[in-house]
Amino acid sequence: MVAKLREILLTQYIGSILIALLVLQAAVEVVTRIARIGFWTFNRVHSESVLGGYSRNPFSWENFAFSLVSAALYLLAAYLLARWLFPAPIAFPHDGDPTPALDQQEQE
């Protein structure tokens, strides 16, 4: 069943689209978090009242951490999916022999 799913994801290009969407979602999380930090900083600087009072809100660290973890999980899922769908090719020695090359120390 897993092999059939992998075959479908490869032949229909759904896997590549899914990887791109996961990376895009991670980028959206990062850009959104940067925009929210900028908005919070702007409001913090410009929140002084004419009468000298302040209405500052503390920085929301839990939302910051949640966004970073979400972006990291999106990227991890995209990476693992890419490695599963498109595994790295096996490198063979240049002499055409399909057996792995031995180190110099092992040959002596």
Image (cartoon, rainbow, N blue to C red):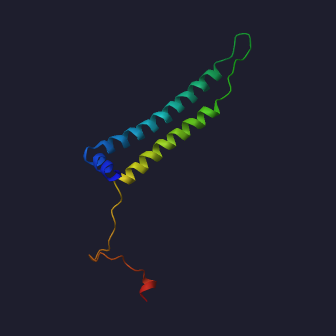
Residue sitting farthest toward the front: 1
Residue 2 pos. (x, y %): 35, 51
Residue 39 lies, with reference to residue 66, above or below; the image says above
Residue sitting farthest toward the bottom: 108
Identified at 43% across, 36% down, the residue is: 25
* Along the line of sight, the residue nearer the viewer: 67 or 47: 67
Quadrant of res 55: top right
Residue 31 pos. (x, y %): 48, 33
| 56 left or right, relative to 31 | right
| 88 left or right, relative to 70 | left
Residue 56 lies, with reference to residue 8, above or below; the image says above
Q: How many marks?
A: 0
Residue 65 pos. (x, y %): 60, 37
Please state, as top left, top right, bottom left or bottom right, where the C terminus lies in the image: bottom left
Residue 29 lies, with reference to residue 47, above or below; the image says below
Residue 34 lies, with reference to residue 79, above or below; the image says above
Identified at 72% across, 17% down, the residue is: 54
Identified at 58% across, 29% down, the residue is: 37
Residue sitting farthest toward the top: 51
Identified at 46% across, 44% down, the residue is: 75
Residue 105 pos. (x, y %): 46, 84
